[in-house]
Image (cartoon, rainbow, N blue to C red):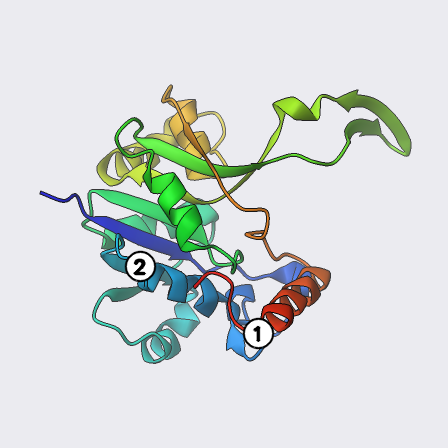
Amino acid sequence: MKEQVDAVIVAAGSGTRLGASVPKAFVPLCGSPLVSYSYSVFRTHPAIDNIVLVVPQQLIESSNEMFSDPRTMIVAGGKERWESAKNGIEASGADWVLIHDAARPFVSHKVIDSVLSLISNFDCGITATPEVDTIRTYTGNTAGETIDRSKLIRVGTPQLFKRDLLYQLIESAHTLSQIPTDEAMLFQAFGHTIGLAWGDPKNFKITTPEDFEIAEAIIAKNSMFLGR
């Protein structure tokens, strides 16, 4: 029997650094809300059973209209990222969940396939790309030592989790001295091994107005969304 896989797209962030009048995931990118790009990719992937879209409370009604689909559930986010993720997985009854950041519009079926290939060997897996820049430490305005970039990766999303185990760990997160900033770190904090799948550098995270300009240029150059 096929195990069920749901996608949880976290789209509840404020996007303060963008200076936009709407939450970041709903800022228009080439005429469509940012979140709609990754949503379309997950919706058309044959291995994804349902999609849980986690949005700000004030956008629940408009999101239900915008993403009207029998396989899509809209839930409200929380004040913190982990609360939004928890609300998303609570709405899912799947065996596995893929948690994705709506600020990464250029996810593709190939990237999804890559992380799903970890299911047989891990309870948790991340997508990542190699670090290509020279990385240094620093103090104030003084450059420090160069770090060996061959040992570094850039972590992205989607990230894969055994749904029930993730829920248990989130419920136990209060026992940690510090709540991890993402769900994979939570798994690692409780001693679980994290599987690694290679992603795509184009699946970058939009954070600043300059990132939006790059994303618009990518879409314009290719005349259609690259993930399809």
Find residue 75 and report its horizontal and vertical position in percent: 32, 62
Contact flag, marks 1 and 2 (Cβ < 8 Å): no
Residue at disc 2, secondary structure: strand
**Quadrant showing the C terminus:** bottom left
Determine the residue positioned at 67% across, 68% down.
217
Residue that appears at 43% across and 65% down: 56
Locate residue 86, reporting x and y percent.
34, 47
Mark in the foreground, 1 or 2: 1
Circle 1 packing at 10 Å, graded few (<14), some (14-19), many (20+), is few
- Please, is residue 227 above or below residue 132 in the view? below
Image coordinates of residue 60 in percent, x first then y, are 36, 72
Q: Quadrant of residue 120?
A: top left
Measured as percent of width and height from the top left, residue 223 is found at 57, 74
Which residue ends up furthest to the left in the rendered image?
1
Disc 2 target residue: 52
Label 2: few (<14), some (14–19) or many (≥20) C-alpha neighbours in 10 Å: many
